[in-house]
Image (cartoon, grey):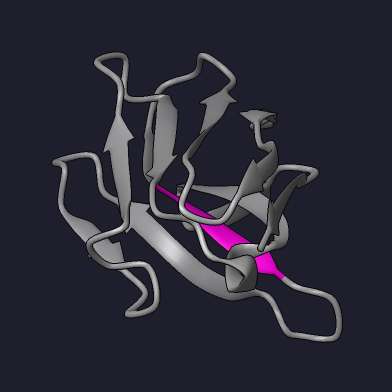
Amino acid sequence: QVQLVESGGGLAQAGGSLKLSCAATRIPSIGTMGWYRQAPGNQRELVATITTSGTTNYAEAVKVRFTISREKDKNTVILQMNNLKSEDTAVYYCKAIRYGVEYWGKGILVTVSS
């Protein structure tokens, strides 16, 4: 069983920065990890993903502003969010895939004030 612990987030002003971190249980064979977000009244959407080899994928809305990275142990993923906008306000969820099974974190709130 994979458990994901998210940290970071909180309140930021528009134009500011925040960093989210997600640590997965220290077990082997965790594949792609990523971040998704869900704003009130909206469906959950992709923010960014990163594979074990470091290949990244970003939603168009966050390209250039957000950077996803993976720490050496490969079970921790970081989302650096710069130049935040009010539309980035959402609950952010970490996801990990292991042997084809998806695991989700509980979510962490990011609020951007304009």
Is 42 above or below relative to 31? below
Name of the residue lying farthest toward the front: 114
Q: Residue at x 51, y 14 (%)?
A: 26
Q: What is the x, y in percent for residue 14? A: 55, 56
Q: Which residue is drawn at 42% across and 41% down?
A: 79
**In the drawing, does residue 56 fall left or right of residue 88?**
left
Tell me where residue 69 sits by quadrant: top left
Q: Which residue is drawn at 66% across and 52% down?
A: 93
Is 29 above or below relative to 107? above
- Give the quadrant of the C terminus: bottom right
Q: What is the x, y in percent for residue 44? A: 68, 75
Closer to us: 15 or 36:
15
| Secondary structure that dominates the magenta span | strand
Residue 79 inside the magenta-drawn segment: no
Q: Which residue is drawn at 76% across and 85% down?
A: 42
Q: What is the x, y in percent for residue 77? A: 42, 33
Q: Magenta residues, as a range? A: 33-38
Closer to us: 50 or 102:
50
Is 64 above or below relative to 30? below
Name of the residue lying farthest toward the right: 41
Q: What is the x, y in percent for residue 37? A: 63, 64
Residue 35 inside the magenta-drawn segment: yes
**In the drawing, does residue 76 fall left or right of residue 104?**
left
**In the drawing, does residue 28 fall left or right of residue 21?**
left
- Give the quadrant of the N terminus: top right
Is 12 above or below relative to 56? above
